[in-house]
């Protein structure tokens, strides 16, 4: 029994050294004589990573329109037609300017550092359930459409291994090398302070909802002052504004727009610009949104979103302003346009 003792039993009995000594494979220079050298074709099958400097990129190309068709076939079921996401699947487009908020939306356009990360992930892990089934050209096309959905390129853009490094994602400069070993580890490894650790101690904020802040001299006055400052201004005389029934109808119609546009308090740019204050504003009015050239040209011409312009655009976006990126086909009748305009005036201000 001692001669055939197994590794597990040897470990339990404290005889690991004996087991290794009696059963070790023949040694040789540089190894233990196990396995064989990987074949070149085996290495190629595993060596599929792509790096920020372009190393690992295969030869190929794909344009936005081809990518849109592939996206609808392979990606839209989970990530939405425009990258807005379906149910709890990840959002791919939009989220611009949200990283410093309480609910950041981390997308390719708002958060990801390198385009190579996008290419590598699509190539390696997508589509869901059939990973690595896409050709290099198909991956280039899908990545081009993802860039277009994030307002990084125009609709006639073609991505290839030759121009890959010319595209930079907006958040690249905010990534940096991990310095926690030099900064955080040193800070948390030192001897902790147990007494007299601060020069002075005082209350710098007060609880506004629950009365749990310790009472101090003048503390009540501070709370009362804060409450008075936060009190809303007396309501101004009621403005008739748009017909409430029409506003309600417009709000219902606007649901189909919410995948791309936000309006109201806290509205931010997404796949499309936020629409606060659009009524009466010039074209391309939203700060921080990358409009297509045709919108920028309309703004430079001084064109304004009045009833006529909004109606024409809502009824036929591509016909009213050719070569823009709006994917919506248009409303069915002018009554719907009138209702949405009423809602835009009510929810987004005039």
Image: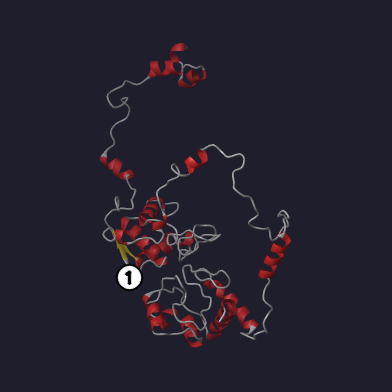
Q: Nearer the viewer, residue 8 or 219?
A: 219
Element carrying mark 1: loop
Q: Which quadrant, please, contains the C terminus?
A: bottom right
Residue furthest to the front? 199
- Residue 241 in the figure: left or right of residue 296: right
Residue 162 % position (x, y): 26, 59
Question: Residue 239 appears at what percent x and percent y?
Answer: 64, 85
Which residue is the site of mark 1? 156
- Image position of 154 with respect to 105: above or below: below
- Quadrant of residue 36 in the image? top left
Q: Nearer the viewer, residue 16 or 197?
A: 197
Task: Give the residue displayed 34% in from the left and 62% down from the top.
Answer: 141
342 on left or right of 74:
right
The single residue placed furthest to the top in the displayed view is 2
Q: Is residue 227 above or below residue 341?
A: above
Across and down, in percent, residue 34 comes to 32, 27
Q: How many numbered circles does the render carry?
A: 1
Question: Dot 1, crowdedness within 10 Å: few (<14), some or many (≥20)?
Answer: few
């Amino acid at each position: 029994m001692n001669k055939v003792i197994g590794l597990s039993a040897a470990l339990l009995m404290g005889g690991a050294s004996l087991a290794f000594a009696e059963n070790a494979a023949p040694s040789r220079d540089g190894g233990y004589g196990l396995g064989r050298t990987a074949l070149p074709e085996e290495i190629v099958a595993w060596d599929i990573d792509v790096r920020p400097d372009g190393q690992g990129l295969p030869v190929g190309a794909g344009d936005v329109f081809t990518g849109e068709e592939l996206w609808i076939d392979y990606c839209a079921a989970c990530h939405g037609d425009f990258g807005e996401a379906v149910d709890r699947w990840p959002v791919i487009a939009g989220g611009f300017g949200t990283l410093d908020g309480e609910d950041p939306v981390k997308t390719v356009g708002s958060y990801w550092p390198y385009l190579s990360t996008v290419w590598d992930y699509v190539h390696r892990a997508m589509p869901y359930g059939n990973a690595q089934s896409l050709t290099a050209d198909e991956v280039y096309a899908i990545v081009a459409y993802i860039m277009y959905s994030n307002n990084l390129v125009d609709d006639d853009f073609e991505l290839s291994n030759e121009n890959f490094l010319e595209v930079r994602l907006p958040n690249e400069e905010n990534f940096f090398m991990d310095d926690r070993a030099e900064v955080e580890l040193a800070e948390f490894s030192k001897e902790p302070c147990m007494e007299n650790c601060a020069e002075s101690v005082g209350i710098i904020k007060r609880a506004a909802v629950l009365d749990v802040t310790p009472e101090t001299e003048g503390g009540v006055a501070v709370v009362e002052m804060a409450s008075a400052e936060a009190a809303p201004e007396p309501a101004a005389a009621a403005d008739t504004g748009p017909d409430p029934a029409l506003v309600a109808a417009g709000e219902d119609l606007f649901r189909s727009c919410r995948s791309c546009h936000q309006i109201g308090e806290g509205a931010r740019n997404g796949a499309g610009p936020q629409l606060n204050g659009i009524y009466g504003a010039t074209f391309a009015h939203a700060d921080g949104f990358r409009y297509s050239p045709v919108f920028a040209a309309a703004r430079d011409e001084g064109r304004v979103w009045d009833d006529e312009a909004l109606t024409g655009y809502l009824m036929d976006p591509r016909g009213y302003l050719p070569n823009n990126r709006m994917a919506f086909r248009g409303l069915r009748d002018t009554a719907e346009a009138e209702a949405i305009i009423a809602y835009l005036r009510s929810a987004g201000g005039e």
